[in-house]
Amino acid sequence: MKKENLIFWSATIVIALFEGVMPALTSQTELAKEGIRHLGYPEYFGSALVVFKILGVLVLVIPKIPKRIKEWAYAGFTYNFIFASISHGVVDGINGHTFFPLIALGVLALSYFYYYKLNYNKS
């Protein structure tokens, strides 16, 4: 149980840092705004995305949040990573920016797998 808990929290903290803390601190920089424009999205989309990322991270890291809401947060991040990968692939072609969201998706999947194992497979 200790190993599962360590893996779950390690993966979840990585997601929280990359999807909650970093966007919260950098979303209003010119580089972030240009990144959103470069992909063809309006500037308000980036702001909305940051709000939902922060809310999603809070849902994942606060233990008292109901399981069903956590499931929705995992689903939201999954869609986010898949569509980020598609957006980068379509606009920039296949490169590192295309695959980074898929790596993050792998970390999210690890977090979800161990979340499920810790919360639903209690014998």
Image (cartoon, helix red, strand yellow):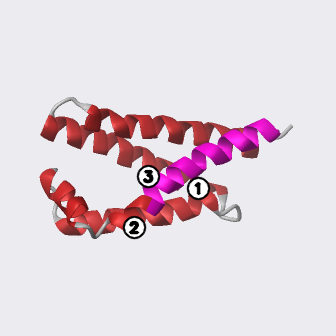
Rendered view: 55 above or below 36: below
Dominant SS type (magenta) = helix
Residue 112 versus residue 42 in the image, above or below: above
Please state the horizontal and vertical placement of residue 21, each as a whole percent of the image: 47, 62
Considering only order in the chain, which callout, 3 or 2, is on the residue closer to the N terminus?
Answer: 2
Tally of numbered tags: 3
Q: Residue drawn at (44%, 50%), measured in percent from left and top? A: 77
Identify the residue under disc 2.
Answer: 25
Residue at image mark 3: 76
Give the secondary structure at mark 2: helix
Residue 70 badge: 1
Residue mark closest to the camera, 2 vs 1: 2
Which region shows up in magenta? 1-21
Can residue 37 be seen from the camera position used here? Answer: yes
Give SS at disc 1. Answer: helix
Q: Secondary structure at mark 3?
A: helix
- Residue lying at 33% horizontally and 62% vertically, measured from the top left: 49
Three-letter amino acid code of the residue under disc 1: Lys
